[in-house]
């Protein structure tokens, strides 16, 4: 039993399944040397052509040279795009793609300047380079498989497993195409140099250059080149393969040359094999030795509609329209098809503005006689010809039924994804069913379904992650709220509650004292007094709470507020004192009116307290307070006293400086107005006791202790008066004032 | 007589043994929840759009497993409905949605007009909107399921639902894209 390598050395060939023998029509284009094309005015370079995630390295308006990189990227699969000639980047915008769909894709448009200036190419000796350097050069040259699939070569040349056998694919089994044929005939030495580089990178045991036996000139040229090359004798051989379509397919070629079958879903590297196109070998040599990026490739232009069929060096990015113009197109653009690739596997081009790509090996311009009618599909007769022809050992009929019925999962169960879309089944079909089209539709539908499934799974994952996050956030919020509540409770039991309790105790004591005082008064007044006292107590409680809160938070930040509160309290006390003084001084018996006044005073005190808590009056607008003052003060005769009272109020307001919200401002104005009105009224009542009170008031603002004393003395004098109700009110007011004053004092002391 | 006794005893013993076996199996291999729900959910498109009237795909899957109608999922389209019909063994019903809804769309924010209110971010069921308070938002279109839920909360109406653009990778092949099907015999050239 011979080993595989021995069999290979003997030149044994295996039979591959299926295949067809379509008319070749190769001599249409392989008679002439590879020609050159005149420069186009414009080149269109889709970005990125091969590999993803590239960044643009040029800007619109920038001048680029031939071979200059247009993109930059760092990923492993990144393959750069190069300018094919010198010129100016005029636009970077979506342009028609060289794809069956003709969908616009982002492209870099270069207006050629005709100079064809190139960047300086870094030539190198292969022997002086390390393998890594060679691979980097190959990557930076943007080399991709030139057989048609355009897979980045540097990835292929960096296999995970050992490669034992390298196959150089010069089969070119598609009808019409002769680009590899011409390349092998004219550039066999360069191809062999490229093969030497591959040999160095992978050190395989054997290299087979496989060429179909319909290209005797190419086989001969390559044989001569091989003899001239530095490759070790016996390591490399040229094998002529019988002409059959599709021997050039990667898996089919491996089967023919080694008898091994690449498993479904696997790549040849898993069998220790690697297949490279001859054009790729040429490009590798050009990149490594000459330092040239992959900017040109050989393209076959053929078909009966081509006026000068042949092979041409074409800059990648050349618009197809330019090729048609330069080489002559005998057909009609609207009715005659332009096919990219061969007749078996190619696709028709919907827009002639599309460019030549790295994988474009042929532009087929068939005449009407060369192509069959489109609408000739007839029912499947179950002849089974397609199953015989299928090189992938599939059951095209079954695939067709399921694809047509859109039962894609069933089609997939018949290994639809192993279909290489070679077109043999369509070719042999007596019913002219475009089977490959059905498979392509099914494949893209399956791909879409898989994509959707993946997206759905991902969406579900994200949805669930979001739900979890929201739940966690909610829990965290609840925990935080709980913690805050506990902290509040803790502080309440500590400082706050004590302060409140203290204030309550103080008020109770005061109330008791008050009641003792009022006990001397008429008994009838008692209930009313009690009520008033309760109100006063409530006010005091409110004050205590208000003042207690800042004390808890304590520290220096509380000081301004305390100061302000003290001032406000002093002002209230002053107002009360004024009122009391007025009442006592004015001996006019107006009990009801005075009663009302006292109530107002209490209300004002409350309002002021509120204002103080609501916060921080700034400067009080005197003008705005004047109307209300006038209204309330229609009977006021003496303006002087009123005016005297105003400044003191302003002082109070001013001292209670800091930020002014609109509300507090308004409240302050109202309070000031009421206070002024009161002062005026008091002045009106006691024409004789004139300036004494305002001055006293201003004293009080400065010294709360005085206020306390004054208030006491005033309330004493009030007690002496005979008018019970008036006395009571005055007393209550005085008590409130006292409480305020005390508090203010306490605050001041605390502050000190 | 003894034969009858033996038969009775044997059958009793057998009944006991199998009873114990079954009881054990019922405990050991107990299935949590309704397995049908998972199968239904796997068919739903997971847009979490709530167009079915349920808050997400899972609740609708539960509802279907519980006997709800299968035609309430516009994002899934007729294909999903048919699969659900297959799975549930019910007759396919026409989808209660217009054709327009069935085009796959994703949200785009007109970024110039975005005021950064974060309302759409809160509405997005799959966290596909990126942004912060008073800063411009944008949709990560790859993550967007096209559920429409962000459109309504936007106070400045700067969110558009645009059809997903086709790329060369997502393009569906059409019949007769390859016109050359049959070559004629070799001709002298």
Image: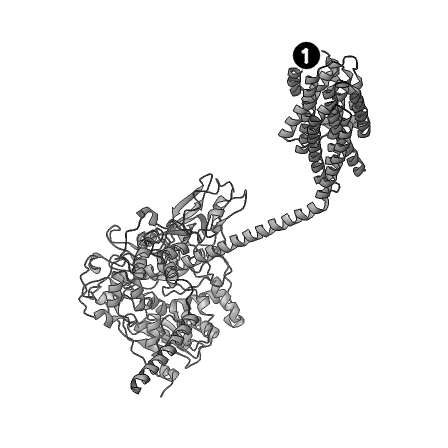
Determine which residue is flagged by label 1: A635
Residue A20 image position (x, y, % from top left):
24, 70
Q: How was this image coloured?
A: one colour
Quadrant showing the N terminus of chain B: bottom left
Question: Farthest residue toward the bottom?
Answer: A1
For numbered disc 1, what is the local secondary structure? Answer: loop
Other residues around mark 1 within 10 Å, as few (<14) / some (14–19) / many (≥20): few
Q: Quadrant of residue A255?
A: bottom left
Q: Looking at the image, is B159 positioned above or below residue A601? A: below
Can residue A63 be seen here? Answer: yes
Residue A698 image position (x, y, % from top left):
78, 23
Can residue A346 be seen here? Answer: no
Quadrant showing the C terminus of chain B: bottom left
Q: Nearer the viewer, residue A118 or A363?
A: A363
- Name the residue rendered at 21%, 70% in the picture: A385
In this image, A84 relative to A213: left or right?
A: right
């Amino acid at each position: 039993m011979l080993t595989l390598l021995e069999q290979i050395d003997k030149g044994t060939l295996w039979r591959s399944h299926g295949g067809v023998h379509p008319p070749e029509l190769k001599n249409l284009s392989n008679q002439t040397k590879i020609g050159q094309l005149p420069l186009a005015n414009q080149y269109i370079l889709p970005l990125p052509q091969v590999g993803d995630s590239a960044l643009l390295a040029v800007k619109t308006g920038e001048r680029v040279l031939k071979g200059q990189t247009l993109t930059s990227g760092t990923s492993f699969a990144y393959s750069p795009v190069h300018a094919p000639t010198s010129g100016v980047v005029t636009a970077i915008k979506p342009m028609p793609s060289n794809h069956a769909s003709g969908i616009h894709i982002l492209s870099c448009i270069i207006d050629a300047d005709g100079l064809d200036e190139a960047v300086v190419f870094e030539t190198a000796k292969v022997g002086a380079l390390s393998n890594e350097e060679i691979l980097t050069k190959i990557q930076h040259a943007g080399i991709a498989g030139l057989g048609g699939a355009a897979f980045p070569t540097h990835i292929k040349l960096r296999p995970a497993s050992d490669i034992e056998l390298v196959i150089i694919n010069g089969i070119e089994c598609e009808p019409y195409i002769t680009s590899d044929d011409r390349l092998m005939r004219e550039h066999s030495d360069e191809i062999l140099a490229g093969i030497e580089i591959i040999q160095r990178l992978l050190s395989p045991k054997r290299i087979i250059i496989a060429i179909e036996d319909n290209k005797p000139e190419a086989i001969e040229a390559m044989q001569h080149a091989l003899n001239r090359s530095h490759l070790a004798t016996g390591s490399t051989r040229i094998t002529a393969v019988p002409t059959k379509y599709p021997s050039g397919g990667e898996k089919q070629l491996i089967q023919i040359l080694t008898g091994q079958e690449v498993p479904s879903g696997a790549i040849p590297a898993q069998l220790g094999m690697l297949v490279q196109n001859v054009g790729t070998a040429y490009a590798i040599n050009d990149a490594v030795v000459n330092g040239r990026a992959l900017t040109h490739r050989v393209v076959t232009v053929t078909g009966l509609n081509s006026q000068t069929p042949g092979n041409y060096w074409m800059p990648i990015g050349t618009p197809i329209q330019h090729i048609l113009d330069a080489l002559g197109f005998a057909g009609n653009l609207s009715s005659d098809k332009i096919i990219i690739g061969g007749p078996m596997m190619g696709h028709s081009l919907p827009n002639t503005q599309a460019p030549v790509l790295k994988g474009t090996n042929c532009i087929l311009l068939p005449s009407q006689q060369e192509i069959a009618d489109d609408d000739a599909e007839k029912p499947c007769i179950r002849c089974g010809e397609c199953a015989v022809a299928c090189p992938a050992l599939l059951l095209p009929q079954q695939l067709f039924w399921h694809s047509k019925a859109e039962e894609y999962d069933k089609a997939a169960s018949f290994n639809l994804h192993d279909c290489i879309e070679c077109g043999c089944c369509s070719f042999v079909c007596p019913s002219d069913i475009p089977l490959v089209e059905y498979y392509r539709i099914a494949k893209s539908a399956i791909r879409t379904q898989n994509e959707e499934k993946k997206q759905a799974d991902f969406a579900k994952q994200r949805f669930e992650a979001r739900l979890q996050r929201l739940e966690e956030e909610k829990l965290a919020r609840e925990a935080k709220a709980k913690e805050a509540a506990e902290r509040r409770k803790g502080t309440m039991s500590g400082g706050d509650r004590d302060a409140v309790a203290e204030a309550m105790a103080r008020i109770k004591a005061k109330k008791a004292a008050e009641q003792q005082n009022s006990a001397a008064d008429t008994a009838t007044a008692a209930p009313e007094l009690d009520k008033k006292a309760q109100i006063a107590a409530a006010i005091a409680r409110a004050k205590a709470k208000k003042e207690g809160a800042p004390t808890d938070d304590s520290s220096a930040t509380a000081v301004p507020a305390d100061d302000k509160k003290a001032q406000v309290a002093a002002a209230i006390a002053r107002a009360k004192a004024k009122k009391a003084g007025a009442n006592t001084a004015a001996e006019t018996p107006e009990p009801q009116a005075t009663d009302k006044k006292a109530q107002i005073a209490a209300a004002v005190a409350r309002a002021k307290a509120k204002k103080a808590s609501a916060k921080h009056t700034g400067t009080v607008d005197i003008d705005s307070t004047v109307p209300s003052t006038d209204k309330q003060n229609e009977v006021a005769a003496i303006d002087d006293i009123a005016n005297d009272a105003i400044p003191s109020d302003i002082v109070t307001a001013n001292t209670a400086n800091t930020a002014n919200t609109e509300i507090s401002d308004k409240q302050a104005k109202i309070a000031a107005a009421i206070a002024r009105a009161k002062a005026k009224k008091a002045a009106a009542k006691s024409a004789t006791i004139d300036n004494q009170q305002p001055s006293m008031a201003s004293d009080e603002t400065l010294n709360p202790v005085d206020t306390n004393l004054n208030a006491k003395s005033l309330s004493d004098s009030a007690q002496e008066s005979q008018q019970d109700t008036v006395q009571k009110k005055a007393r209550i007011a005085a008590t409130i004032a006292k409480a305020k004053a005390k508090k203010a004092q306490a605050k001041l002391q605390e502050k000190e | 007589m003894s034969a009858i006794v033996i038969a009775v005893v044997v059958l009793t013993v057998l009944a006991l043994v199998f009873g114990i076996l079954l009881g054990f199996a019922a405990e050991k291999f107990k299935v949590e929840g309704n397995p049908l729900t998972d199968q239904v959910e796997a068919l739903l498109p997971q847009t979490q759009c709530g167009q079915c009237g349920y808050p997400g795909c899972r609740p609708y899957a539960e509802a279907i497993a519980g006997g709800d109608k299968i035609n309430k999922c516009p994002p899934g389209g007729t294909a999903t409905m048919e699969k659900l019909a297959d799975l549930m063994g019910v007759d396919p019903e026409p989808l209660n949605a217009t054709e327009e809804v069935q085009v796959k769309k994703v949200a785009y924010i007109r970024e110039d007009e975005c005021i950064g209110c974060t309302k759409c971010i809160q509405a997005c069921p799959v966290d596909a909107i990126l942004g912060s308070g008073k800063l411009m938002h944008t949709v990560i279109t790859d993550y967007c399921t096209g559920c429409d839920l962000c459109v309504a909360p936007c106070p400045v109406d700067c969110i558009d639902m645009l059809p997903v653009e086709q790329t060369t990778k997502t393009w569906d092949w059409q019949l007769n894209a390859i016109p050359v099907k049959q070559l004629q015999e070799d001709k002298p050239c």
